[in-house]
Image: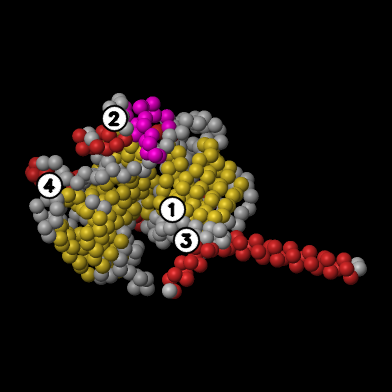
Amino acid sequence: MKPINTLKFRIFLFSALALLIIFLIYKAIVPFGEIYYQADICDTSFFISKLKPLDRVNGECQNIITGDPVYFNLNTSRTFDTGILTLKYKSSPTASGTVGVVNPIIEIGVLADVQKHYLLKPLENKILDKLSWDIITENGISLWQREKKYEDISQFLDNIQKISQDKIATYYYDLPSANVIPNYGNYLVSSKAFPSGSIPELIGSYQFYTYIENEKLDFIFKFKKLDNDKDGAGSINVYYKNNLVKQSNIPTDGSIELKMENQPAGFYKIAVNAPDNIITEKINSTHRIISFINKIQLAKTAEPGLINITTDSSEIFIRTVNPDSLQKIMAEDEIINIAETYRQFSQIINSPKTDIKLAKDGIEIAGDGMFSFSADALYNPNYKKINKNTNLENIDYIIAKYKPSSTQEEWKTKTIEFDLKNAYRYESAYGFIISIPGLKADDDIDDFIEIGEIEIKLTGTTLWEKTKQVLSSKL
């Protein structure tokens, strides 16, 4: 090779290397504050990971979801403010032996905190898509009316107090919860006082509603720590009308009294935020209503005895990690055989309220409603939320932050926007979840959701804006 050609070849190599370095720096810094990632699900992408876990996906490209939920990560070198996610997908046709719509709801969420809570948003709701009621859609909010009475959504909201709460359902739209119990004096006469000491030991975090009227808020919690090698503590937060009104630190061992006097009448939400090595041994109170929200996790004790739970959930989910807690659970007339550890068992409930009886503790029970250890202590101040099991027979109005779709195409493409400013990043990655409630990998139904493509557009501060922020902070 002639010297001149060797020089040209070296220049070419150095130029290519320089361009590669510039490209990688651009990808890392994103100087203009905007970048776009795309992954055909069969391609290998450093930025958008494959779906997991593997026991809930099938197909050569591991893109056919057969169990709920599945997860994927978005790897980024910096933080962003907004993410616009576009998903191309198709659903399985109605499977033989099934009743109604298969997999009616698909939701996507971004990881919100270290406790693995996700901020979910609706992707598809076939229940609402197929509803033939009168519909009004304004600014991304939809109102369904069985019989049209209101001309717009604001008129409906202005008159909502005139409508019985049990006639209204919501979907990703927060209506103000009921804040008073009508004729509370009659309720006190007709119900029994909450039996002191009836709450078994609970593990980790939980939250519940209570109610006061012409009385003080008064609870005593007793805690103990399981493992001295792990960090403990946490907090107890009290909310009134979604506003934090009191906060107390949890002692790792010992009791704490939660007392508030001269408070307005209404429902109060008490949230105990604690790691799984903190046990609530006792909750003592004279209040009539103590309704646990969505979930209770019973600690494992030596001699639990018979445990009675009442719920208004339309479906309950039960699991245990303790081999000694395997058992048969009675839910009304149905027997749920908890025969394996770490596996989630479920049961659809057809009654407004259901009694559950357990012979052993050490299990977690979850659902879409309230749970209480006394039937009279169960009271749900929230509006009914639409889920895959919702019976619309007695519902007249549905309000949702959801725009229905009428497309009949096999492959659908939908877009969701996420606020990433408060999302949780772990090891330089945003975590995402795809949830299809009721989709099970181990049943005999041939149903699935197939993912074709994932696209994500990220927007954040530009390099110039970041520079200005740093300079202004130093002035």
Residue 393: x %, y % from top left: 30, 29
Between disc 3 and disc 2, the foreground one is 2
In the figure, is residue 434 to the left or right of 367? right
What separation in Å lies between label 4 and label 2 (alpha carbons)?
A: 41 Å
Q: CA distance from mark 1 to mark 4?
A: 45 Å
Q: Amino acid at mark 4?
A: Lys
Q: Residue placed at 36% from the left, 32% from the top?
A: 136
Q: Amino acid at mark 3?
A: Arg
Q: What kind of element bears circle 2?
A: loop
Residue drawn where x is 79% and y is 67% of the image: 11
Q: Residues within 10 Å of mark 2 (few under 14, many from 20)?
A: some
Residue at numbered disc 4: 192
Amino acid type of the residue tagged 2 in the rendering: Tyr
Q: Decide: few, some or many residues near mark 4? Use Cα within 10 Å; few <14, some 14-19, many ≥20.
A: some
Q: Which residues are magenta?
A: 129-146
Q: Residues within 10 Å of mark 1 (few under 14, many from 20)?
A: few
Position of the N terminus, as image quadrant, is bottom right
Q: Is residue 144 left or right of residue 178?
A: right
Q: Is residue 175 above or below residue 341?
A: above
| Residue under label 2 | 150
